[in-house]
Amino acid sequence: MSLILSEEQELLRDTARDFVQEHLSVKAFRAIRDQDVADGFDRKIWAELCELGWAGIPFSEEVGGAGLGFAELGVVLEELGRTLAPTPLLATVALGGTAVALAGNETQQKEILTAVCAGERLLALAFQETPRFNPEVVETRAETAADGYTLTGEKRLVVDGHVADTLVVTARSADGSVGLFLVDAGAAGLSVERTRMVDSRNAANVRFDGTPAQALGDPTASAAVVDEVLDRAMIALSAEMLGGIQESFERTLQYLKDRDQFGVKIGTFQALKHRAADWFCEVELARSIVLMALRGVDDAAPNLPQLASAAKARTSDVYIQSGEEGVQLFGGIGMTDEEDIGLYLKRARVTELWLGDGDYHRHRFATLEGY
Amino acid sequence: MADLDTFRSETRSWLEANCPAEMRTPPKSAFDVAWGGRKAEWASPEQKQWLDVMAEKGFTVPTWPKDCGGAGLSKAEAKVLKQEMRALGCRPPLMSFGITMLGPVVLEYGTDEQKRKFLPPIARGDIRWCQGYSEPGAGSDLASLQCKAERDGDDYVVNGQKVWTSEAHLSDWIFCLVRTNSDASKHDGISFLLIDMDDPGVEATPIELISGASMFCQTFFDNVRVPVNHRIGAENAGWTIAKKLLQHEREMLSDPGGSGSPTGARKRGTLADDARLSLGASEGPLPDTALRERIARLELDTLCYKATLTRSADGAKAGRGVGPETSMFKLYMSELNKRKSDLRVRIRGANGLGWTGEGFARDDLAATREWLNSKAESIAGGTSEIQRNIIAKRVLGLPD
Ligand SMILES: Cc1cc2nc3c(=O)[nH]c(=O)nc-3n(C[C@H](O)[C@H](O)[C@H](O)COP(=O)(O)OP(=O)(O)OC[C@H]3O[C@@H](n4cnc5c(N)ncnc54)[C@H](O)[C@@H]3O)c2cc1C
């Protein structure tokens, strides 16, 4: 698949951009933050997004999806990333939904994904147990029970866990294998604590105490599936991050052209020009690898894990760099809450550390490549 | 597409029938790829034979028109040819500045007569060209060049000096920027001249580099007579052509494995292979975690860089030409190559410190020399600082 957008994808981007600018601007995000909206997003707008078909982009037409791919999902996520729009798209569709699509049996796919596409169900993927991302650590236990399983353990940084109707959870069975399980929001022995993160988004700390659960597909056969789900999650997140990277770069570039000091635009200073030029290269490289990874999902690329790590390593490094450069080049005003650039730095921090930062992914890449 | 398939199968059989077995092994050094010219020294009879059959087909410059020595192929066909050559492991038959730099601007700006005169010998590898741009006082600020050409009847008389002229001592002709009007502003008084280095008054003397090689020269012009019809484009309009040529040069220099990269011509093991050998670690994660991290970082940056080249090529297919974004490629590629050459020495530790002779393996000595040579990457063809200036101005639109 070509690394530039097709005409259809450009059309989707334009539609998405218009919608996002109108309904999901940075201003709208600030309103949600300032009112401390309990859900952390606007349900009315989410319903409209689902009507536009965004929640079903990568899912099959049988479940009410659009039958498109990650390339298209990425287009939309990038636009949402540009305005820091808080929506359930990432957690429900790219993470939880992907897990159901990859690991679920036919009945589960039909039931859950149909509801997701229709905007009637929110999902969250609960996998992280350690402070730093390390998906190999799974101490949450799954024990067989009369009609299914019970889960015991704790998860953190469960993005959108506080609003999810269904949690998709990684847990270890008695035989040591790691699998995926479904837990309903109201289940017994489940406690969900909403946290407010530095980027004003919400994740949950989730505790399972003998909580009834259902296996997603075959739990003993799904160890590899967990990796596949996480690869896709990293790639989708990278697409959102790319939007934030591009936007913070463009906003700063504009500031260099607008701000006067010493009687000239600060963009005339060579020290700043060179930083902008290097930053531009980084942004372009990030875009290329994200596009390649998104297409890698759709084309079933044999080196998809490498592409996922390449994309996440890059966007992690470049987004945090973009946030830092942005604040620095805006000067004093960059430190204020009133100026948007700092919001990008905060989102950069969260998305950088979520699902593995640059160091994690370089290490993983080396392992995947056999050194 | 059916046509392209036919072209592919025809090309493959032709290559199989015509590419000598010796030319299907990876080149061991830069000398294993022909650069042509009157002073060419052939590494083997097969090297010459391979060049001759390819040139006859027009395949040394596949997209050039037939009457200019090319095969008149479309871009798609040229890509197929490249793919088939790669599939069979065929070496490039010929590399030269004529092909990558001069040819494209003669095609764009030359008269029909100039095209027919200058292009076929480039395609055949008969004439080797070098680049006479830089002068002692004009490097990054190229437009301040002083080498002078004064009109005398149907000739120009050229006087002055060029410097850093790569491979001038092995070349036959030089494309030169000369000042034809000293009164105009510095960009407006420059012309683009083609000069035969056998002409009386031209002299090139090699300069020794930090790597010990002498691949570039000082080139002197003392009352050299050059016919006016060896000027490309109008008098005093050379700057536009000069800049266009630089874009082609930067494009060449940003091709990993292209003639511009010092490591490109030689096929080598991966950095991880080098590290295993040096660390004596036959399997498992490399025990030197700092080295491992450096290697992964470089490999990932390379992957992202290549993805960007692919994206740019996909963009070109959709109708975008060579523009100032080549500066980005040049900038990034130079820094990548420098880091890679640096890492090869770093990995080798004490084995990477040899200069000559006993006690060092050939491959280790080569790595050291390559590290030194690689420093040129961010200087030649416009320094990295200049590339950043160009990006800031032309791509990002930052004010002067
Ligand atoms: C291996 C090699 C091969 C070469 N081959 C050829 C050839 O075949 N033909 C040819 O004509 N030339 C050739 N060159 C010359 C090359 O193009 C010049 O060296 C180059 O353009 C830099 O010019 P300079 O050496 O005069 O350095 P200078 O221009 O003096 O630069 C010195 C330093 O100042 C910096 N600098 C200069 N101006 C600015 C600015 N405006 N902003 C910020 N920093 C600036 C530079 O980046 C550099 O770091 C070759 C050079 C090398 C190393």
Image (spheres, grey):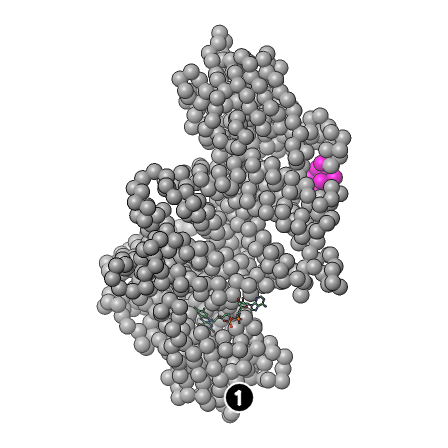
- Quadrant of the image occupied by residue B373: bottom left
- From the viewer's perspective, tell me whether residue B154 is left or right of residue A78: left
The spot of residue B359 in percent (x, y) is 26, 59
State whether label 1 is within 8 Å of ligand 1: no
Tag 1 subunit = B
As drawn, the residue found furthest toward the bottom would be: B153
The spot of residue B364 in percent (x, y) is 31, 57
**What's the residue at 59%, 47% (across, down)?**
A321
**What's the residue at 46%, 11% (across, down)?**
A144
Task: Check disc 1 and give the amino acid type.
Answer: Glu
- Quadrant of the image occupied by residue B257: bottom left
Q: Nearer the viewer, residue B339 or A158?
A: B339
Pointer 1 residue: B150
- From the viewer's perspective, tell me whether residue A121 is left or right of residue B96: right
Give the mark count.
Answer: 1
Please give the range of residues in magenta: A19-29
Please, is residue A304 above or below residue A276 in the view? above
Q: Nearer the viewer, residue A249 or A156?
A: A156
Screen quadrant of the C terminus of chain B: bottom right
